[in-house]
Image (cartoon, coloured by chain):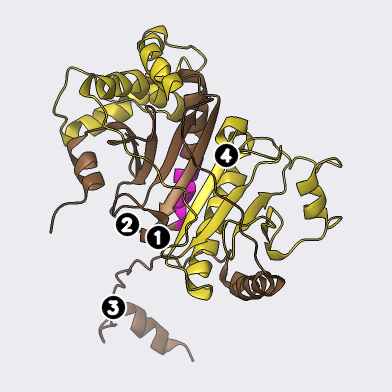
Amino acid sequence: MAELSDNCIFCNILKGAIPSKKVYDDEHCSAILDINPAGIGHVLLIPKDHVAIFPQLPQETVEHLAFIAKGLSKSMLKNLGCQGTTLFIANGAVAGQKADHTMIHLIPRFEKDNVGIVLPSHKLPDNVKQQLVDGLSPLVAQILGGKMPEKKEEKVEGKEAEKKKEEIGENKEMPGKKQDNPKSSLDSITELLTRG
Amino acid sequence: MAECLVCHCIKNREFVIYENSALAVLIHPSPAVAGHLMIVPKEHFPIVESVPDAIIKEMMVVSAKMSVLLFEALQAQGTNTLWLNGAPAHQQFNHAALHVIPRKENDNLMLSWAPKQLSDDEMSTAELKLKEGSKEVGIPEPKKVVPVEVKKAETAKEDDWRLKYLNRIP
């Protein structure tokens, strides 16, 4: 496990050097009430590893945090009487991250609570959709292992799944290699993103 | 009843960019921004609480990896991971999901909230209630009991040679 840092506010909260309202604690994480809450019962679930962004956490910690977040969410529904929960993780300042210690926000939600956090919906043009599917599928397969069927095969039957598994092996041979083609086809998407 | 849209996508391989036995990664059909991904359990669970522990863990692990993907493939400057669980949280589909959203400067996405001033009383009450409830947090859900077929013990027949042998023991 990564060391706690002396300069980090949240590490000091975890150590107990800064007081907090702790509502859950175990060897991997603590949950405290946010002092600037979006609403009643807004909890910060903080891992006891001082890492800046969520993807830097070891896999076991990520799994544990998911498990605890689900448990806390259940507890909120039961004990606070809320009708839903919002989980929020920000990686990077543009995403709204404020501290350099990664954490999960868990916010109990009530009818008409004015908290916001609504995802807008935009129409996804067919060509962009296809670009994303074609561009991202091989990269996801590279990261997660496994492979999506070739583009030409429109309808995929159950048998394909087995075939896919067999192909995992050859896929693992080049974990570091970046595929240039899918990446370049995503350039236009990147522009779309920048435009917002 | 109309089919769940997410289930429909999984079944028809629409918007799907990855799947394994437990979960699928989808391009959001009506995204907040281009590159908006959803990680969903393949089985239909309406809310997060109904998703089995093992699957919610795997979904979160995949969401972290999808953040890295968005950083690298789409040059995102940041990412948000969210679950919108229940109607007041503006859940979009009747199917539990983790959203991973690429962020850029000036992308016009407002995913923040205004801090509320709560009284000490309100804070302490919430603390007390959640602390009380935390006793049930961190306890793994009971494993599904798979009924095991128990073979009936063979009843020894009287003419079993082993029985005869037993009877001889003084």
Residue designated by label 2: B45
Q: Nearer the viewer, residue B20 or B163?
A: B20
Q: Chain of mark 4?
A: A
Q: Residue A50: x, y in percent?
A: 74, 40
Q: Chain of mark 3?
A: B
Q: Nearer the viewer, residue A44 or A111?
A: A111
| Contact flag, marks 1 and 3 (Cβ < 8 Å) | no
Regarding mark 2 in the picture, which secondary structure is present there?
loop
User: Cα distance, mark 3 to mark 2?
Assistant: 44 Å
Q: Are marks 1 and 2 on the same chain?
A: yes
Residue A168 lies in what quarter of the image?
top left
Q: Amino acid at mark 3?
A: Glu
| Contact flag, marks 4 and 3 (Cβ < 8 Å) | no
- Note whether residue B155 is visible: yes
The hue of chain B in the figure is brown
User: Cα distance, mark 1 to mark 2?
Assistant: 18 Å
**Mark 3 or 2 closer to N-term?**
2
For image coordinates 62% across by 57% down, the residue present is A37
In front: label 4 or label 2: 4
In the displayed structure, would residue A23 be above or below residue A142?
A: below
Q: Amino acid at mark 4?
A: Ala
The magenta segment: B53-62
In the displayed structure, would residue A95 be above or below residue A27?
A: above
Residue designated by label 1: B88
The hue of chain A in the figure is yellow
Report the disc number at residue B154. Answer: 3
Regarding mark 3 in the picture, which secondary structure is present there?
loop
**Mark 1 or 3 closer to N-term?**
1
